[in-house]
Image (tube, rainbow, N blue to C red):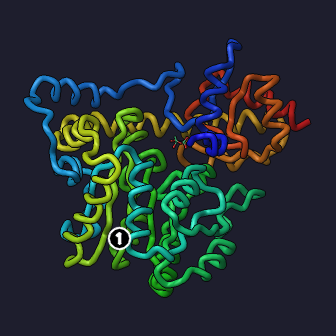
Amino acid sequence: MFETLPDPRLDGIIALMQAFADDTRMGKIDLGVGVYRDAAGRTPVMAAVKAAETRIVETQETKTYLSLAGDSAFLESMRDLVLGGAVPAGRVAAVGTPGGTSAVRQICELIRLARPEATIWVSAQTWPNHGPLIRAAGLGIRAYRYLDPEAGALDRDGMMADLEAVARGDVVLLHGCCHNPTGVDLGLQDWAEIGALLERRGAIPFVDMAYQGFGEGLDADAAGLRHLAARLPEMLVAGSCSKNFGLYRERVGIAMAVVPEGQRARLAGTLAGLSRQVFAFPPDHGGRVVSTILGDPALRIMWSRELDEMRLRVAANRRGLADALRTATGSDRFGFISGQRGMFSLLPLSPAQIETLRAAHGIYMLGDGRVNMAGLNEASVPVLAQAMAEVLR
Ligand code: LMR
Protein backbone atom coordinates (compact mmCIF):
# COMPACT_ATOMS: atom_id res chain seq x y z
CA MET A 1 0.00 0.00 0.00
CA PHE A 2 2.86 2.41 0.63
CA GLU A 3 4.28 2.53 -2.89
CA THR A 4 1.88 5.36 -3.67
CA LEU A 5 3.31 7.57 -0.94
CA PRO A 6 5.06 10.65 -2.29
CA ASP A 7 8.67 11.15 -1.24
CA PRO A 8 8.75 12.75 2.21
CA ARG A 9 9.70 16.41 2.27
CA LEU A 10 11.77 17.29 5.29
CA ASP A 11 11.07 20.69 6.87
CA GLY A 12 13.97 23.05 6.05
CA ILE A 13 14.90 23.52 9.72
CA ILE A 14 15.08 19.79 10.39
CA ALA A 15 16.99 19.13 7.14
CA LEU A 16 19.54 21.78 8.11
CA MET A 17 19.97 20.25 11.60
CA GLN A 18 20.78 16.95 9.87
CA ALA A 19 23.18 18.52 7.37
CA PHE A 20 25.01 20.31 10.18
CA ALA A 21 25.31 17.10 12.22
CA ASP A 22 26.71 15.30 9.15
CA ASP A 23 29.35 18.00 8.47
CA THR A 24 32.69 16.78 9.89
CA ARG A 25 34.54 20.11 9.56
CA MET A 26 36.04 21.68 12.66
CA GLY A 27 34.81 25.20 13.32
CA LYS A 28 31.46 24.80 11.57
CA ILE A 29 28.88 27.30 12.84
CA ASP A 30 25.23 26.38 13.44
CA LEU A 31 22.86 29.33 13.01
CA GLY A 32 19.93 27.11 12.02
CA VAL A 33 17.43 25.71 14.49
CA GLY A 34 16.16 28.13 17.13
CA VAL A 35 17.79 26.98 20.33
CA TYR A 36 19.56 29.19 22.85
CA ARG A 37 23.32 28.66 23.19
CA ASP A 38 25.63 30.12 25.80
CA ALA A 39 29.01 31.69 25.04
CA ALA A 40 30.56 28.21 24.95
CA GLY A 41 27.99 26.99 22.43
CA ARG A 42 26.08 24.80 24.90
CA THR A 43 22.36 24.65 25.56
CA PRO A 44 22.50 23.97 29.29
CA VAL A 45 19.65 22.85 31.53
CA MET A 46 18.67 26.00 33.44
CA ALA A 47 19.59 25.93 37.15
CA ALA A 48 15.99 26.61 38.19
CA VAL A 49 14.88 23.67 36.02
CA LYS A 50 17.46 21.37 37.64
CA ALA A 51 16.31 22.45 41.11
CA ALA A 52 12.65 21.89 40.23
CA GLU A 53 13.42 18.50 38.69
CA THR A 54 15.28 17.41 41.81
CA ARG A 55 12.33 18.43 43.95
CA ILE A 56 9.89 16.57 41.69
CA VAL A 57 11.96 13.37 41.65
CA GLU A 58 12.23 13.42 45.45
CA THR A 59 8.58 14.07 46.20
CA GLN A 60 6.53 12.61 43.33
CA GLU A 61 4.59 9.54 44.44
CA THR A 62 2.71 8.57 41.31
CA LYS A 63 2.76 9.00 37.58
CA THR A 64 -0.79 7.85 37.04
CA TYR A 65 -2.98 9.66 34.52
CA LEU A 66 -4.24 13.17 35.15
CA SER A 67 -7.07 14.79 33.21
CA LEU A 68 -6.89 15.15 29.42
CA ALA A 69 -6.12 18.85 29.91
CA GLY A 70 -3.05 18.07 32.03
CA ASP A 71 -1.92 19.38 35.40
CA SER A 72 -4.12 22.27 36.56
CA ALA A 73 -1.18 23.98 38.35
CA PHE A 74 0.69 24.11 35.02
CA LEU A 75 -2.33 25.44 33.14
CA GLU A 76 -3.04 28.14 35.70
CA SER A 77 0.57 29.27 36.08
CA MET A 78 1.04 29.48 32.31
CA ARG A 79 -2.28 31.28 31.86
CA ASP A 80 -1.08 33.88 34.35
CA LEU A 81 2.43 34.11 32.87
CA VAL A 82 1.07 34.73 29.38
CA LEU A 83 -2.18 36.61 29.99
CA GLY A 84 -1.10 38.33 33.21
CA GLY A 85 -4.65 38.86 34.43
CA ALA A 86 -5.73 40.72 31.27
CA VAL A 87 -8.97 38.72 31.35
CA PRO A 88 -10.79 36.90 34.17
CA ALA A 89 -9.77 33.24 34.58
CA GLY A 90 -13.37 32.27 33.77
CA ARG A 91 -12.80 33.35 30.17
CA VAL A 92 -9.81 31.07 29.51
CA ALA A 93 -10.07 27.44 28.39
CA ALA A 94 -6.68 25.70 28.30
CA VAL A 95 -5.08 22.32 27.65
CA GLY A 96 -1.48 21.20 27.88
CA THR A 97 0.07 20.05 24.61
CA PRO A 98 3.30 18.32 23.56
CA GLY A 99 5.18 21.54 22.77
CA GLY A 100 4.04 24.72 21.09
CA THR A 101 3.84 22.90 17.74
CA SER A 102 0.97 20.72 18.98
CA ALA A 103 -0.68 23.77 20.49
CA VAL A 104 -0.73 25.38 17.03
CA ARG A 105 -2.06 22.19 15.46
CA GLN A 106 -4.77 21.63 18.09
CA ILE A 107 -5.93 25.22 17.73
CA CYS A 108 -6.14 24.74 13.96
CA GLU A 109 -8.25 21.61 14.58
CA LEU A 110 -10.47 23.65 16.90
CA ILE A 111 -10.94 26.30 14.21
CA ARG A 112 -11.77 23.59 11.66
CA LEU A 113 -14.45 22.14 13.95
CA ALA A 114 -15.99 25.55 14.60
CA ARG A 115 -15.58 27.14 11.18
CA PRO A 116 -14.08 24.95 8.46
CA GLU A 117 -14.35 27.75 5.90
CA ALA A 118 -12.17 30.13 7.94
CA THR A 119 -9.03 31.44 6.30
CA ILE A 120 -5.94 31.70 8.49
CA TRP A 121 -3.90 34.80 7.69
CA VAL A 122 -0.19 34.49 8.32
CA SER A 123 2.59 37.05 7.95
CA ALA A 124 4.30 36.62 4.56
CA GLN A 125 7.43 35.55 6.42
CA THR A 126 6.55 33.16 9.20
CA TRP A 127 7.79 30.05 11.01
CA PRO A 128 8.17 27.47 8.21
CA ASN A 129 5.95 24.99 10.06
CA HIS A 130 2.92 27.29 10.33
CA GLY A 131 1.79 26.62 6.75
CA PRO A 132 2.06 22.81 6.97
CA LEU A 133 0.22 22.75 10.32
CA ILE A 134 -2.62 24.91 9.03
CA ARG A 135 -2.95 22.93 5.80
CA ALA A 136 -2.78 19.59 7.62
CA ALA A 137 -5.86 20.70 9.56
CA GLY A 138 -7.59 21.33 6.23
CA LEU A 139 -7.80 25.09 6.61
CA GLY A 140 -7.24 27.76 3.99
CA ILE A 141 -4.27 30.08 4.33
CA ARG A 142 -3.44 33.57 3.06
CA ALA A 143 -0.46 35.82 3.63
CA TYR A 144 -0.34 39.45 4.72
CA ARG A 145 2.69 41.64 4.08
CA TYR A 146 4.93 42.03 7.10
CA LEU A 147 8.59 42.82 6.44
CA ASP A 148 10.05 45.75 4.58
CA PRO A 149 13.27 43.95 3.60
CA GLU A 150 15.19 47.10 2.68
CA ALA A 151 14.63 48.71 6.07
CA GLY A 152 14.62 45.46 8.06
CA ALA A 153 11.47 46.89 9.65
CA LEU A 154 7.72 46.44 9.68
CA ASP A 155 5.86 47.11 6.43
CA ARG A 156 3.08 48.70 8.45
CA ASP A 157 1.09 50.10 5.55
CA GLY A 158 1.31 46.85 3.57
CA MET A 159 0.25 44.80 6.57
CA MET A 160 -2.74 46.97 7.43
CA ALA A 161 -3.84 47.19 3.78
CA ASP A 162 -3.73 43.39 3.40
CA LEU A 163 -5.57 42.80 6.66
CA GLU A 164 -8.43 44.98 5.38
CA ALA A 165 -9.37 41.95 3.24
CA VAL A 166 -9.90 39.73 6.28
CA ALA A 167 -13.46 38.37 6.38
CA ARG A 168 -15.75 37.95 9.38
CA GLY A 169 -14.74 34.75 11.18
CA ASP A 170 -11.28 34.61 9.64
CA VAL A 171 -8.30 34.10 11.93
CA VAL A 172 -5.16 36.26 11.94
CA LEU A 173 -2.02 34.56 13.19
CA LEU A 174 0.36 36.94 14.99
CA HIS A 175 3.68 36.30 16.70
CA GLY A 176 3.43 37.39 20.34
CA CYS A 177 7.03 38.63 20.32
CA CYS A 178 10.41 37.89 18.72
CA HIS A 179 8.89 37.36 15.29
CA ASN A 180 10.24 34.21 13.65
CA PRO A 181 12.03 34.60 11.22
CA THR A 182 12.26 38.39 10.85
CA GLY A 183 13.04 39.63 14.40
CA VAL A 184 10.67 42.53 13.64
CA ASP A 185 8.06 42.96 16.36
CA LEU A 186 4.82 44.88 16.46
CA GLY A 187 4.81 47.99 18.65
CA LEU A 188 1.98 48.69 21.09
CA GLN A 189 0.43 51.11 18.62
CA ASP A 190 0.44 48.36 15.95
CA TRP A 191 -1.24 45.91 18.32
CA ALA A 192 -3.89 48.54 19.07
CA GLU A 193 -4.51 49.20 15.38
CA ILE A 194 -4.71 45.48 14.61
CA GLY A 195 -7.11 45.09 17.55
CA ALA A 196 -9.34 47.82 16.15
CA LEU A 197 -9.26 46.26 12.68
CA LEU A 198 -10.11 42.78 13.97
CA GLU A 199 -12.94 44.24 16.04
CA ARG A 200 -14.31 46.05 13.02
CA ARG A 201 -13.99 43.04 10.69
CA GLY A 202 -15.24 40.46 13.23
CA ALA A 203 -12.04 38.40 12.89
CA ILE A 204 -10.16 36.50 15.57
CA PRO A 205 -6.51 36.82 16.61
CA PHE A 206 -4.43 33.69 17.07
CA VAL A 207 -1.20 34.54 18.86
CA ASP A 208 1.78 32.19 18.75
CA MET A 209 3.85 32.94 21.84
CA ALA A 210 7.03 30.88 21.60
CA TYR A 211 9.69 33.30 22.89
CA GLN A 212 8.21 35.17 25.86
CA GLY A 213 11.09 36.74 27.78
CA PHE A 214 13.53 36.87 24.85
CA GLY A 215 12.44 40.26 23.49
CA GLU A 216 12.26 42.94 26.18
CA GLY A 217 11.17 40.96 29.23
CA LEU A 218 8.36 38.67 30.37
CA ASP A 219 5.64 41.30 30.76
CA ALA A 220 6.71 43.66 27.98
CA ASP A 221 6.74 40.75 25.52
CA ALA A 222 3.14 39.86 26.35
CA ALA A 223 1.75 43.41 26.33
CA GLY A 224 0.34 43.25 22.78
CA LEU A 225 -1.30 39.87 23.31
CA ARG A 226 -2.81 41.08 26.60
CA HIS A 227 -4.20 44.16 24.89
CA LEU A 228 -6.02 41.97 22.35
CA ALA A 229 -7.28 39.59 25.07
CA ALA A 230 -8.79 42.46 27.02
CA ARG A 231 -10.26 44.12 23.95
CA LEU A 232 -11.78 41.33 21.89
CA PRO A 233 -14.41 38.71 22.74
CA GLU A 234 -12.37 35.81 21.38
CA MET A 235 -8.71 35.00 21.02
CA LEU A 236 -6.57 31.89 20.55
CA VAL A 237 -3.10 31.46 22.02
CA ALA A 238 -0.42 28.81 21.47
CA GLY A 239 2.24 28.95 24.16
CA SER A 240 5.58 27.17 24.37
CA CYS A 241 8.05 26.56 27.19
CA SER A 242 10.74 25.18 24.87
CA LYS A 243 12.86 28.32 24.76
CA ASN A 244 12.16 30.35 27.90
CA PHE A 245 12.48 27.31 30.17
CA GLY A 246 14.95 25.50 27.89
CA LEU A 247 12.66 22.45 27.95
CA TYR A 248 12.92 21.75 24.23
CA ARG A 249 12.83 17.97 24.20
CA GLU A 250 10.39 17.67 27.11
CA ARG A 251 7.64 19.07 24.85
CA VAL A 252 5.80 21.60 26.99
CA GLY A 253 3.10 23.71 25.40
CA ILE A 254 -0.34 25.10 26.06
CA ALA A 255 -3.34 25.82 23.83
CA MET A 256 -5.66 28.52 25.16
CA ALA A 257 -8.97 29.89 23.95
CA VAL A 258 -10.11 33.20 25.43
CA VAL A 259 -13.90 33.28 25.07
CA PRO A 260 -16.95 34.92 26.64
CA GLU A 261 -17.47 33.55 30.13
CA GLY A 262 -20.41 31.22 29.39
CA GLN A 263 -18.47 29.39 26.67
CA ARG A 264 -15.40 28.36 28.65
CA ALA A 265 -16.59 24.85 29.61
CA ARG A 266 -17.53 23.97 26.04
CA LEU A 267 -14.18 25.15 24.73
CA ALA A 268 -12.25 23.31 27.44
CA GLY A 269 -14.16 20.10 26.71
CA THR A 270 -13.68 20.45 22.95
CA LEU A 271 -9.94 21.04 23.30
CA ALA A 272 -9.66 18.04 25.64
CA GLY A 273 -11.59 15.91 23.13
CA LEU A 274 -9.22 16.96 20.34
CA SER A 275 -6.24 15.94 22.50
CA ARG A 276 -7.86 12.54 23.10
CA GLN A 277 -7.86 11.91 19.35
CA VAL A 278 -4.12 12.47 18.95
CA PHE A 279 -2.03 12.04 22.10
CA ALA A 280 -4.70 11.83 24.82
CA PHE A 281 -2.80 13.07 27.89
CA PRO A 282 -0.08 15.69 27.45
CA PRO A 283 3.43 14.91 28.76
CA ASP A 284 3.61 15.81 32.44
CA HIS A 285 7.22 16.15 33.54
CA GLY A 286 8.13 19.40 31.79
CA GLY A 287 4.84 21.06 32.72
CA ARG A 288 5.40 20.11 36.35
CA VAL A 289 8.86 21.68 36.18
CA VAL A 290 7.27 24.89 34.90
CA SER A 291 4.55 25.02 37.56
CA THR A 292 7.08 24.18 40.30
CA ILE A 293 9.24 27.12 39.20
CA LEU A 294 6.41 29.58 38.71
CA GLY A 295 4.79 28.57 42.01
CA ASP A 296 7.89 29.00 44.15
CA PRO A 297 9.05 32.60 44.68
CA ALA A 298 12.75 31.72 45.03
CA LEU A 299 12.82 29.42 41.98
CA ARG A 300 10.85 31.95 39.99
CA ILE A 301 13.41 34.67 40.68
CA MET A 302 16.25 32.29 39.84
CA TRP A 303 14.58 31.38 36.54
CA SER A 304 13.69 34.92 35.48
CA ARG A 305 17.29 36.03 36.17
CA GLU A 306 18.62 33.22 34.02
CA LEU A 307 16.17 34.17 31.29
CA ASP A 308 17.24 37.83 31.54
CA GLU A 309 20.84 36.74 31.08
CA MET A 310 19.91 34.76 27.98
CA ARG A 311 17.97 37.69 26.54
CA LEU A 312 20.82 40.11 27.17
CA ARG A 313 23.34 37.74 25.61
CA VAL A 314 21.30 37.49 22.42
CA ALA A 315 20.93 41.29 22.31
CA ALA A 316 24.71 41.65 22.76
CA ASN A 317 25.27 39.21 19.88
CA ARG A 318 23.02 41.39 17.74
CA ARG A 319 25.02 44.51 18.52
CA GLY A 320 28.29 42.63 18.02
CA LEU A 321 27.23 41.32 14.60
CA ALA A 322 25.90 44.69 13.44
CA ASP A 323 29.22 46.33 14.46
CA ALA A 324 31.34 43.60 12.89
CA LEU A 325 29.38 43.83 9.63
CA ARG A 326 29.76 47.60 9.61
CA THR A 327 33.53 47.15 9.84
CA ALA A 328 33.76 44.21 7.41
CA THR A 329 31.50 45.65 4.70
CA GLY A 330 32.19 49.35 5.22
CA SER A 331 28.45 50.03 5.14
CA ASP A 332 25.57 50.37 7.57
CA ARG A 333 23.16 48.21 5.61
CA PHE A 334 23.07 45.58 8.39
CA GLY A 335 22.50 48.11 11.17
CA PHE A 336 18.91 46.85 11.50
CA ILE A 337 20.18 43.67 13.18
CA SER A 338 20.88 45.41 16.48
CA GLY A 339 17.39 46.92 16.70
CA GLN A 340 15.50 43.67 16.08
CA ARG A 341 14.40 41.30 18.82
CA GLY A 342 14.59 37.68 19.82
CA MET A 343 16.59 34.86 18.34
CA PHE A 344 16.13 35.50 14.64
CA SER A 345 16.92 37.93 11.87
CA LEU A 346 16.58 37.51 8.13
CA LEU A 347 19.81 38.40 6.36
CA PRO A 348 19.31 39.76 2.84
CA LEU A 349 21.48 37.16 1.08
CA SER A 350 20.80 35.26 -2.12
CA PRO A 351 20.40 31.46 -2.16
CA ALA A 352 23.81 31.24 -3.90
CA GLN A 353 25.47 33.36 -1.20
CA ILE A 354 23.87 31.24 1.53
CA GLU A 355 25.11 28.09 -0.19
CA THR A 356 28.66 29.52 -0.45
CA LEU A 357 28.61 30.37 3.25
CA ARG A 358 27.77 26.73 3.99
CA ALA A 359 30.06 25.07 1.46
CA ALA A 360 33.13 27.30 1.77
CA HIS A 361 32.85 28.57 5.35
CA GLY A 362 30.86 25.90 7.23
CA ILE A 363 28.25 28.49 8.24
CA TYR A 364 24.73 27.09 8.38
CA MET A 365 21.65 29.30 8.11
CA LEU A 366 18.18 28.63 6.70
CA GLY A 367 17.64 28.95 2.95
CA ASP A 368 15.80 32.26 3.35
CA GLY A 369 18.73 33.82 5.25
CA ARG A 370 17.31 33.28 8.75
CA VAL A 371 20.05 33.20 11.36
CA ASN A 372 19.78 32.21 15.00
CA MET A 373 21.48 35.08 16.84
CA ALA A 374 21.71 32.92 19.95
CA GLY A 375 24.03 30.58 18.06
CA LEU A 376 26.76 33.24 17.80
CA ASN A 377 29.54 34.04 20.24
CA GLU A 378 32.56 36.32 20.41
CA ALA A 379 34.60 33.98 18.26
CA SER A 380 32.00 33.32 15.56
CA VAL A 381 30.71 36.90 15.14
CA PRO A 382 33.81 38.14 13.24
CA VAL A 383 34.01 34.87 11.26
CA LEU A 384 30.43 35.33 10.06
CA ALA A 385 30.96 39.04 9.32
CA GLN A 386 34.13 38.35 7.28
CA ALA A 387 32.53 35.48 5.38
CA MET A 388 29.48 37.60 4.58
CA ALA A 389 31.64 40.47 3.38
CA GLU A 390 33.43 38.01 1.10
CA VAL A 391 30.30 36.53 -0.48
CA LEU A 392 28.80 40.00 -0.88
CA ARG A 393 31.86 41.31 -2.73
C1 LMR B 1 12.79 27.17 15.04
O1 LMR B 1 12.06 27.93 14.41
O2 LMR B 1 13.96 26.92 14.69
C2 LMR B 1 12.28 26.53 16.30
O3 LMR B 1 10.99 26.98 16.59
C3 LMR B 1 12.40 25.05 16.31
C4 LMR B 1 11.35 24.39 15.48
O4 LMR B 1 10.63 23.53 16.01
O5 LMR B 1 11.25 24.68 14.29
Residue 269 vs residue 44, the one in the foreground: 269
- Horizontal arrangement in the rendering, residue 274 relative to residue 178 (left or right): left
**Left or right of 247 on screen, residue 96:** left
Q: Amino acid at mark 1?
A: Ala
**Secondary structure under the numbered disc 1 in the rendered image:** helix
In the image, 273 versus 18, the foreground residue is: 273
Res. 176 in view: yes
Residue 39 place in picture, x, y as percent: 53, 23
Q: Which residue is mark 1?
A: 229
**In this orientation, which residue lies closer to the viewer: 113 or 200?**
113
Q: Going 43% across and 39% down the picture, which residue do you hit?
A: 243
Residue 393 placement: quadrant: top right
Q: Position of residue 171 (x, y in %)?
A: 49, 72
Q: 100 above or below 15?
A: below
Please give the count of numbered marks on the rendered protein: 1
Splitting the image into 4 quarters, where does residue 154 fall? bottom right
Q: What residue is drawn where x is 19% and y is 35%?
A: 298
10 Å crowding of disc 1: few (<14), some (14-19), many (20+):
many
Query: Would residue 223 be visible to someone looking at this image?
Result: no
Residue pictured at 67% horizontal, 59% vertical: 153
For ligand 1, tell me if the residue under mark 1 lies within 8 Å: no
